[in-house]
Amino acid sequence: TFADGRLYCYGEGKGTCVLAEATPDGWKEHGRLELPEKSKHPRRSGKIWTHPVLAGGKLYLRDHELLFCFDVAGK
């Protein structure tokens, strides 16, 4: 997902989300977080397939029945 000039990349393996800036000069990481809890439901191919969603300064990450909301608004 792309917002405010940065990429929110949600890894399909561990549920890690990385905030990065991608420019012609390279990739610059600005932060990362990992889901505080993982679903107990079996995943197809063992992966997390949902996309990160940004709305109103909030980042929403889902893993099956679990939904997490993180405040990412710049202050």
Image (tube, rainbow, N blue to C red):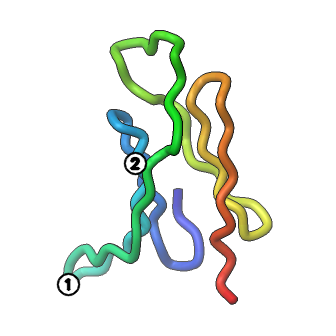
* Residue 68 drawn at (x, y percent): 66, 45
Q: Amino acid at mark 1?
A: Asp
Above or below for 66 versus 73: above
Q: Which residue is mark 2?
A: 16
* Residue 40 drawn at (x, y percent): 51, 16
User: Which image quadrant is residue 31 in?
Assistant: bottom left
Above or below for 27 versus 60: below
Estimate how packed mark 1 is, as few (under 14), some (14 to 19) or many (20 or more) residues with alpha carbons within 10 Å: few
Q: What secondary structure is found at the residue carrying circle 1?
A: loop
> Does 75 sit left or right of 3 as displayed?
right
Q: Earlier in the sequence, mark 2 or mark 1?
A: 2
Q: Please identify the residue farthest to the front as the structure is shown.
A: 36
Would you say the residues marked 2 and 1 are in contact, meaning their CB atoms lie under 8 Å apart? no
* Residue 56 drawn at (x, y percent): 79, 67
How far is the residue under mark 2 from the one under mark 1?
A: 24 Å
User: Which image quadrant is residue 27 in?
Assistant: bottom left
**Numbered mark located on residue 25 in the image:** 1
Q: Please identify the residue farthest to the bottom as the structure is shown.
A: 75
Q: What secondary structure is found at the residue carrying circle 2?
A: strand
Q: Residue at x 54, y 23 (%)?
A: 39
> Does 70 sit left or right of 16 as displayed?
right
